Image: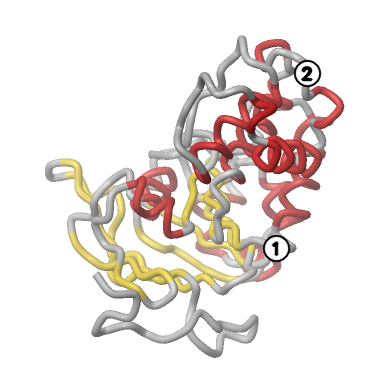
Amino acid sequence: MTDTPAGAIGPATLKADGTGAPLLETRGLTHRFGELRVVCDVNLAIARGELRAVIGPNGAGKTTLLKLLSGELRPTSGRILFKGRDITGWPMHRVARLGIVRSFQITHLFPQLSVLENVRVAVQARHSTYNFWRRAEALPGVVERARALLEEVDLLPKAALPAGVLSHGEQRHLELAVALAAEPELLLLDEPTAGMSVEDTQATARLIRRLAERLTIVLVEHKMDVVMNIAQRIVVLHFGEVLAEGTPAEIRANEAVQDVYLGRGRAAGAGA
């Protein structure tokens, strides 16, 4: 397949005012499990550099949407375009190579390996022949890159520790460093603060905000204080359909959103 197939929609130049072409676009995206429609006719346009949140009640289809965008699931119908290129139905590894990476389910940590080695393996997989037995000293560029990623997620001081001794929040940050080793342009985050303490949640929110300075991020998150404080725009899903889309202020003021999610005391869950 060529880099500029017929039907391409042009360079990814969508600006904050909505002009230009998006980095990521979905058109009529739908996924069914049997007769159950979990994602229904979803149309999105994500700008380069945007931090977009996806929220909704339990079972709204949020995680399924991320699985479709990352290539983990094939859509029943509709299209997914990345930088104008139709990637509908591409497998997950090919989507990741193109620049769309889903965090926390990209890989499992190796608890007996050091924090540095977990990231080093991911960097090596991206850039060189995959060989667990090659000495780290023979890979100076790879080790340097792994250390830089650990510094980015605030884990460099713990580089020599076994990954298994890290706290839950620190392990989430390590998983994020592993995802960053794939050099994404678009990072998909699925419940990044789930199970975290207030302190770890705040640290993770600060980290996501920093990453958004250089990456495009789509975030599924159930903690509304996190969403409202860091997202530029929010999509609300309800029974797999887009109920509302707008800025945090617009979503707060939306009566339909209040009815189904924000204002009636419903607990926000991870979703389908």
The one nearer the camera, 62 or 131, is 131
Q: Which label was assigned to residue 160?
A: 2
Relative vertical location of residue 58 with respect to residue 246 in this rendering, above or below: above
- Where 83 sits versus 66, above or below? below
Identify the secondary structure beneath mark 2. Answer: loop
Q: Which amino acid is tagged 1? A: Arg
Which label sits in the foreground, 2 or 1?
A: 2
Q: Which mark is residue 2?
A: none
The residue under the point 69% across, 17% down is 114
Q: Position of residue 272 (x, y in %)?
A: 38, 39
Q: Residue at 57%, 41% (x, y): give it.
A: 179
Q: In this view, does 76 lie to the left or right of 254?
A: left
Who comes first in sequence, dot 2 or dot 1?
2
* Residue 214, disc: 1
Q: Quadrant of the N terminus?
A: bottom left
Q: Dot 1: what SS?
A: loop
Q: Is 128 situated above or below 215?
A: above
- Farthest-out residue, front: 138
Percent x, y of residue 66: 42, 49
Relative to 26, does residue 217 appear above or below in the rendering? Answer: above
How many numbered marks appear? 2
Whole-percent x and y of residue 218? 55, 56
Residue sitting at x 60%, y 62%: 216
Q: Is residue 166 left or right of residue 246?
A: right
Q: Residue 167: which quarter of the image?
A: top right
